[in-house]
Image (cartoon, rainbow, N blue to C red):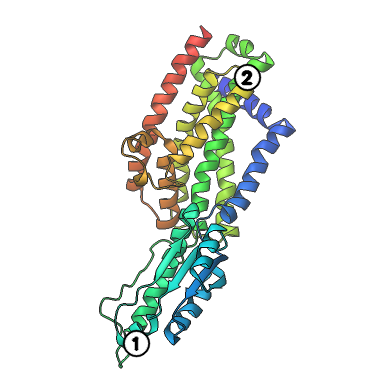
Amino acid sequence: MLFLTRLRALIIKELQALLGDPAGRRILILPVILQTTLFPLAATLEVKNNTLAIFNQDAGPESIELIQRLSRAKAFTNVLFLHSDEAVTETLDDQQALVVLRFPQDFSRRIATGDPAPLQALLDGRRSNSSQIAFSYIQDIVRQFSNEQQMDGKGRTPPSELVIRHRYNPNLDYTYFILPSLVAIILTVTTLIVTSLSVAREREQGTFDQLLVSPLSPEMILVGKAVPALLVGLAQATVILLAAVLAYRIPFEGSLLLLYGAACLYVMALVGFGLLISSFCSTQQQAFLGTFSFVMPAILLSGFTAPIENMPGWLQPLTLANPLRHFIVIAKSIFLKDAGPGFVAYHSFPLILIAVITLSVSIVIFRRRVG
C-alpha cells in the first residue's frame, strides 16, 4: 500500500508538471489536432488534378474515344494536346505534364482490324512515384477500352478479362491507410517526448537530486515517469480514433480492447527508448533533439512511407527492432479487418521483447548515473 501511495504521488507530480504549464499543454494538444486534420489531406499517394499531354498522330474515332475517357479520369483534370516531337520534349522538360501519351498513325486502323495497337507513354522520371501511379490509371482505362473493342457481336467480353476486388478498402480510400497509421505515429512522438524530457527537466530545474533522496527506488521512479506518458499517449490515440470514425467515416471493424491492449505494450516499448534517450541527455534541448533523431528513422523503417520488402536485404532485419513497424501492422489490422487475439498476440510479442530489453538497459544506466 505504501508503494502504491508513493508511486501515485510521483505520477500526480509528473502530470502536474506536464499539464500545468500552458506551453506544455499546447505541445500535447495542438500537434494532435493539426496532424489529424492535415495528414489525411496532405500525406497521400493518390494522383489527382494533373495534366496529361497527348500527341495524337492518328485522329481516328477509336483514338478520339479513348482520349475522351482519359480526360474524364480524376487523375487528369487538364489535357494538353501536342502536335510535334519538339513539343513533347518541351512539355516534359518544363514539367507541364506528368505523362505524355503518343498515339501512332495507324492506331484506329489496328483497332478496327483486331491487331495489337501499341501506345507510347513518356513519364516524368523526376516525379517517379506520381508518374507511375498515374500510368497505372492510364493502363486500367486502356485495358477496359481494349476489352470492350474485342467484344463479339453478342456482347461477350474476352475470356481473359481480369476482375479486381480490393478487400478491407474497396474504394481505395487513402484515409483508410493514413489514420490507423497516424494513431501509431502520434503515440510514438508523444510518448518519446514526454518520457525523454521528464528526466532532463528534473536536471534543469534542479529537482533531480531531491527525487533521488526521496523514498523511491530507481524502478519506482522509472514507473512514475512511464505512466504519465502512457496516459497522455492513450488520450491522444483516443482523439485520433474518434476523428477517424466520426469525422472521416472510416469503419472500425475490430476490438477496442485489443487495440488499447496492444497500444499499452507499444507505449511500454517506447518508454524504454525514451528513458534511454533521457539517460544520456542533460538538458531538455538535447532530449528533444535525441527524440527526433529516433522518430524520423523509426517512421522511415516502419513501412509507413515505403514497403519494407522494397528495402535492401541487409536493412530489413534491422526493422525488427523498430516497435513502430509492429504496431502499425496491429493498428491497421484491427481497424480494417477485425484481427483476432492470435494475430495481435503474434505481432505483440516483439513489442514485449523490445520493452523488456530497453527498460532493463534503462534501469541499469539509471542506477549507474544515480551511483
Give the CA distance from mark 2 to mark 1.
Answer: 75 Å
105 on left or right of 33: left
Q: Nearer the viewer, residue 194 or 78?
A: 78
Image position, residue 266 (x, y; %): 45, 37
Image position, residue 143 (x, y; %): 37, 74
Binning the other alpha carbons within 10 Å of mark 2 as few (below 14), some (14 to 19) or many (20 upward) gives some
- Identify residue for label 1: 112
Against 239, is 245 above or below? below
Q: Determine whether the residue tagged by mark 2 lies in a helix, strand or loop.
A: loop
Image position, residue 59 (x, y; %): 47, 83
Q: Nearer the viewer, residue 139 or 5?
A: 139
The answer to whether residue 264 is seen in the rendering is no
- Identify residue for label 2: 283
**Residue at the (45%, 48%) spot, across then down:** 331
Instruction: Indicate the amino acid at tag 2.
Output: Thr
127 on left or right of 356: right
Q: Which label lies toward us, 2 or 1?
A: 1
Q: Nearer the viewer, residue 224 or 195?
A: 195
Image quadrant in which you'd find residue 281 = top right
**Residue at the (32%, 46%) spot, across then down:** 342
